Image: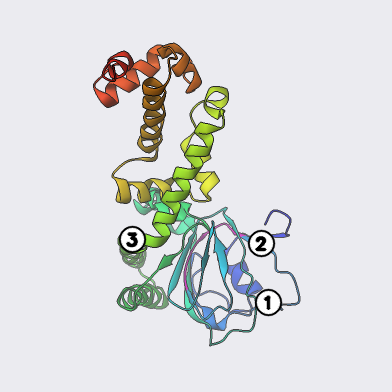
Amino acid sequence: MANKELLHIKSISEYHQRMGLPKPEHTLISVVDYGELRHPDKSVRPPNLMFDFYSISLKKGISGKMKYGQQQYDFDEGVMFFIAPGQVFGVIPTEEPKKKRSGWILHVHPDFLWGTPLAKKISQYEYFNYSVNEALFLSDKEEMAINGMVRDIQQEYHSNIDRFSQDIIIAQLELLLTYAERFYNRQFITRKITNHKILDRLEDTLSDYFNNGNLAEKGLPTVQYIAETLNVSPGYLSGLLKTLTGQSTQQFIHDKLLEKAKEKLSTTDLSVSEIAYALGFEHPQSFSKLFKTKTKLSPLEFRASFN
């Protein structure tokens, strides 16, 4: 993505103009029929995009596949994407669509949220941090529910604007985001094959890191490092691990570290200090404290249990 031209779209009105759409009825919020968009010439390499506003979309009928992290996603079913201001993304259909494109795109400018609780709360919905790492797949029933909420938002800003309009739209938008959060949580559970592949890759990543001498040289891997290696966001990885293992990413890393520590304590004659340094601890006392907190035994007590 980094080598491609970047098109920075600063307002919803500019978006409408560039996409060949009529001027938006409201400059800070707009629902666009995806099927009515002017799609780029496939012979021209499309630029990456960056918006100064939130974009929530449900798209169907896009040809080919798109890569999200290390996974490939089809667009034959209802797929939602959440993009926050300042995120860079790109879409490149690979062939003529097999069926008519459909869906919608809801754009919301941060100024529309100003002065409401949602202005601060919206950043707490972790799926806006997923960027292009994980789309939300909807069942038919979920898709119908989401489509109904978006229609309600559209009808409200199409109506005569009065002093209640913003409060009503904000409430409808918050309902939409809350349902999306519920559906994402369901996805952690139902997409078991994909999720367990990420867990397998996490195990492999930590094993490689621990076995290649990185601990002594670089210290414990950070959550950010692990997430970037797996091409997922820290928030997504944390949510996934909480669902599958009941642990945070940091707890998971510590448990793998303790497995390595137990291996060294039980199979080598290295001193506790030598093991601590080999595992990336600057001070052996810190290692001993963590070990005892997790196992209820000091490193020496653990080693003695094998004699």
Tell me the residue that label 2 is attached to. Answer: 48
Relative depth, front residue between 252 and 77: 252
Residue found at the far left of this picture: 296
Residue 157 figure quarter? bottom left
Q: Position of residue 189 (x, y in %)?
A: 31, 59
How busy is the neighbourhood of tag 2: few (under 14 within 10 Å), some, or many (20 plus)?
A: some
The amino acid sitting under disc 3 is: Glu
Tell me the residue that label 1 is attached to. Answer: 40
Tell me the residue that label 3 is attached to. Answer: 174
**Alpha-carbon distance for marks 3 and 1?**
32 Å
Labels 3 and 2 touching (C-beta < 8 A)? no
Q: Is residue 133 magenta?
A: no
Q: Position of residue 65 (x, y in %)?
A: 57, 71
Foreground disc of the pair 3, 2: 2
Residue segment shown in magenta: 50-58
- Answer with mark 3 or mark 2, whichever residue precedes in sequence: 2
